[in-house]
Image (spheres, coloured by chain):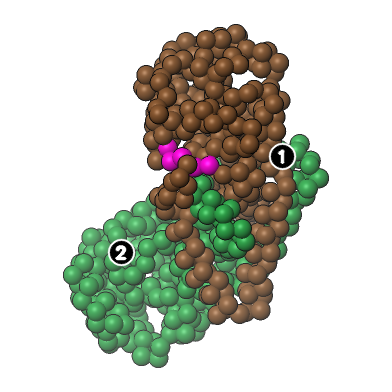
Chain colours: A brown, B green
Amino acid sequence: MTVQPGRAGIVGLGLIGGSLGLDLQSRGWTVQGLVHRQVTADRAIDRGLVNSISTDPACLSGCDLVILALPIPLLLDPPAELLAAIPPAAVVTDVGSVKQPVLAAWRHRHPRFVASHPMAGTALAGVEAGTPNLFCGRPWIATPDGDTDPSALATVKDLAVSLGSHWLTASASQHDQAVALISHMPVLVSAALLRAVGDERDPEIRQLAAALASSGFADTSRVGGGNPDLGVAMASSNRDAVLRVLAAYRWSLEQLEDAVLQENWSQLHVELKRTQALRPDFLQPLGDINAEN
Amino acid sequence: MTVQPGRAGIVGLGLIGGSLGLDLQSRGWTVQGLVHRQVTADRAIDRGLVNSISTDPACLSGCDLVILALPIPLLLDPPAELLAAIPPAAVVTDVGSVKQPVLAAWRHRHPRFVASHPMAGTALAGVEAGTPNLFCGRPWIATPDGDTDPSALATVKDLAVSLGSHWLTASASQHDQAVALISHMPVLVSAALLRAVGDERDPEIRQLAAALASSGFADTSRVGGGNPDLGVAMASSNRDAVLRVLAAYRWSLEQLEDAVLQENWSQLHVELKRTQALRPDFLQPLGDINAEN
């Protein structure tokens, strides 16, 4: 079964929403955008992100599919006018990077809600960021529970696959633990690096460090120098998992520090050989981890 | 004054040594390579890294300039035959990523030794890694002390500038503190991230984390998944500075963790706004920090 392209509503036209608008149009959907500000609406039309746009939630009335591409705080506390405007028969999904709180917020708010998370880059933001084929070759994970409408889930899967994504499912809890490990905790680990360098008290050493920093530092500090709103949203909406993996991280760093302290260079070598061997597991193209779904 | 290209000896033909061989030849130098193994010697000639090659240190006898592009452990404990073969009148420099122990090892071993460190990428290694113009636009820092021969220092500066590098000088201690901050400590911070993810006990979460890891994780984990020999060499030869900055890092991470623990989201936002503002300082093209040198 493949979903027939119909009328899709996209709420929010940042990187994810705007990219979805471009891809859905190219797959035959008619795309209605909903944004907060008129200046964003005008720019979204100029960029061709959607077929039509409005700042009035009522614009969603004819949609078969509604994609909530909102910042996490707004997604977790949706305005009443938005809730009232979503057609009860529409399939509704989101693109948020945490799933337990989203599921808790939406599970009883709409009968055909499917919690999902396309894993696509977040370095760019705003109405200028949307780009075609952002999801091609990337994972798109859904976290259905016992209440999830199977036909709504199938529609979101078809949508993801039609955009070239690799479809996975997991429980919301597993998802949130996994993204805490590979996305949310690394933001804090990387931010702490920038903070430590910024706190260097000797101005000559600090200036020299800035002059000598190369691609290694640029890479390690990238996610920690990103959007503060996004970092706070991740940490606050996935707090328990983030704290759990931060504790594991602290312990892990202490083992390496201890090897340096003890001058146990053979132990440090064993550790760094292991991390060298571990990394390719996280760079592989997706396998068939969830091929049955 | 600009140094006249003459005969340069390069000891070791990995990424740095091999790249120097290519660049020096293109600037008119005749380049003599010295390597340990015959198979490396053959390949270096095939790749055109040097004009002539040998596994016998005596090959350095006619050189005006000798560049020690050796791994740190060998650089700190040079073989007697190598020391005996370096002409006393030659300018000698190294490319090691720590400077205090190198200066301690070489200051009384050769009258014209200049401790220096071209900051170029280290992702590749070995005789296949050398590439033209590796140093162009990159910092090249020297750490002269009161015993450094000014004319030897001027020769190394001319060399660095002729390859397109930005020339800086600092004390060896300042250098080692700065590279601990932006290079050596980040290796351990990044390795600890891989280690923490690798230690995740739930196999489903671990597998999901591997499937969902994206460019952010790839970047943050890059230097921690690098060459273990290099990581150990950095930590062991720059131990005091690495321990000092690791302590600063730990404290820095604790501040962020504490904000998450206390659910102090406004404080976390202030922190992440600061790290966002800090990062560009470490990505700028080099300014005139040391223009007088």
Tell me how far mark 2 sits from mark 1, CA to CA.
46 Å
- Residue sitting at x 59%, y 14%: A87
Q: CB atoms at circles 2 and 1 under 8 Å apart?
A: no
| Residue with the mark numbered 1 | A236
Query: Can I make out residue B150 in this image?
Result: no
Q: Residue at x 59, y 49 (%)?
A: A178
Q: Are marks 2 and 1 on the same chain?
A: no
Instruction: Name which residue type carries label 1.
Output: Ser
Disc nearest the viewer among 2 and 1: 1
> Residue A186's x, y, as percent?
60, 50
Q: Chain of mark 2?
A: B
Q: Amino acid at mark 2?
A: Gly
Q: Could you say where residue B266 lies in the image, as x and y percent from the top left? A: 76, 36
Left or right of residue B23, residue B267 in this image? right
Element type at mark 1: helix
Where is mark 2, residue-wise? B130
User: Percent position (x, y) of residue A33?
Assistant: 51, 15
